[in-house]
């Protein structure tokens, strides 16, 4: 496995590409940028009236115009963003504190006016945290999902783990594990699988669950090949039913 750590950084603009056809939990953005809108409840800095730039991926090499793919985890805690060409960086934006702030404001509609005004002065950038990592196998980000370890372990403060699906624009799929920075611990990024698809360049990547609840990854190539990859081992690993040392070489 390729495992490494990266430090957190505070700087992501959700500005959608009007020509894209985004899936419900993902979107495409022009310029390698992702923006979070204030929704009338949280004010950004005064020069960012229509949203805050939480992080930006900068172009490297000959590709200077980036198209960012963004996917939000099903628990709503992270937005992940990466590009197909021009950079090998992927960003993970933590939204938990922002959601907690909005929930707090919505649950107290009759606050004293002064307290409410003071609370609304919090900038979006003060409520988010960004973890970043750069690796050639992170190119072509397409999808994310959380590996569920049960309510008891989640409430105990155990770090969540997410799977990231990359490989758009190339012939290999890569399944990554991401554990966010937490309580002084740096984020951990590990490449679990690097697998040939036996097709042409990949143009679509998804995660799904079978009728029996088994986690699957789906890749589609330009030549119309559709492949389904079994990731149920990772579900068994996260719940303690299997050991990482017994991981198969390919899903």
Image: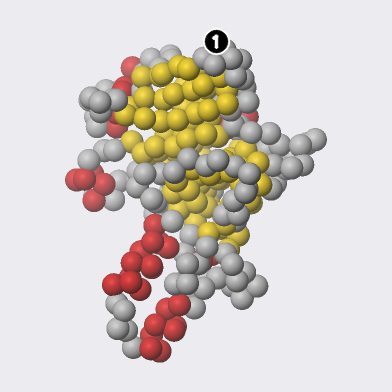
Dot 1 crowding, Cα within 10 Å, few <14, some 14–19, many 20+: few
Question: Residue 178 falls in which quadrant of the image?
Answer: top left
Q: Is residue 118 above or below residue 31?
A: below
Answer with the quarter of the image where residue 49 lies.
bottom right
Q: Is residue 3 visible?
A: no
Quarter of the picture containing the C terminus is top left
Picture quadrant of residue 46: bottom right
Looking at this rendering, what residue extends furthest in the top direction? 198
Residue at disc 1, secondary structure: loop
Residue name at image x 44 percent, y 83 percent: 118
Q: Which residue is mark 1?
A: 198
Image position of 166 with respect to 31: above or below: above
Relative image position of residue 126 (x, y in whole percent) = 50, 67
Q: Nearer the viewer, residue 213 or 160?
A: 213
Where residue 6 appears, x then y in whole percent? 54, 43
Residue 126, relative to residue 5: is it above or below? below
Q: Is the residue 106 above or below the residue 196 in the image?
A: below
* Residue located 47% across and 67% down the image: 39
């Amino acid at each position: 496995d390729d495992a490494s750590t990266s430090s957190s950084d505070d700087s992501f603009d959700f500005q959608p590409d009007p020509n894209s056809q985004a899936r419900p939990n993902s979107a495409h953005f022009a310029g390698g940028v992702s923006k979070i809108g204030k929704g009338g409840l949280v004010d950004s800095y005064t020069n960012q009236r229509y949203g805050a730039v939480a992080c930006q991926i900068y172009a490297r090499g000959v590709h200077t115009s980036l198209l960012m793919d963004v996917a939000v985890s099903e628990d709503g805690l992270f937005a992940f963003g990466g590009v197909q060409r021009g950079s090998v960086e992927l960003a993970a934006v933590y939204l938990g504190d922002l959601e907690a702030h909005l929930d707090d404001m919505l649950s107290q509609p009759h606050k004293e006016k002064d307290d409410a005004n003071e609370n609304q002065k919090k900038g979006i950038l003060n409520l988010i945290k960004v973890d970043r990592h750069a690796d050639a196998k992170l190119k072509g980000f397409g999808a994310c999902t959380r590996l569920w370890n049960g309510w008891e372990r989640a409430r105990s403060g155990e770090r969540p783990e997410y799977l990231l699906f990359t490989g758009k624009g190339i012939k290999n799929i890569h399944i990554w594990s991401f554990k966010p920075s937490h309580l002084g611990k740096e984020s951990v990024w590990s490449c679990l699988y690097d697998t040939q698809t036996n097709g042409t360049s990949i143009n679509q990547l998804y995660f799904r669950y079978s009728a029996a609840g088994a986690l699957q990854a789906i890749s589609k190539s330009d030549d119309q090949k559709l492949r389904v990859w079994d990731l149920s081992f990772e579900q068994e690993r996260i719940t303690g039913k299997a050991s990482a040392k017994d991981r198969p070489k390919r899903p």
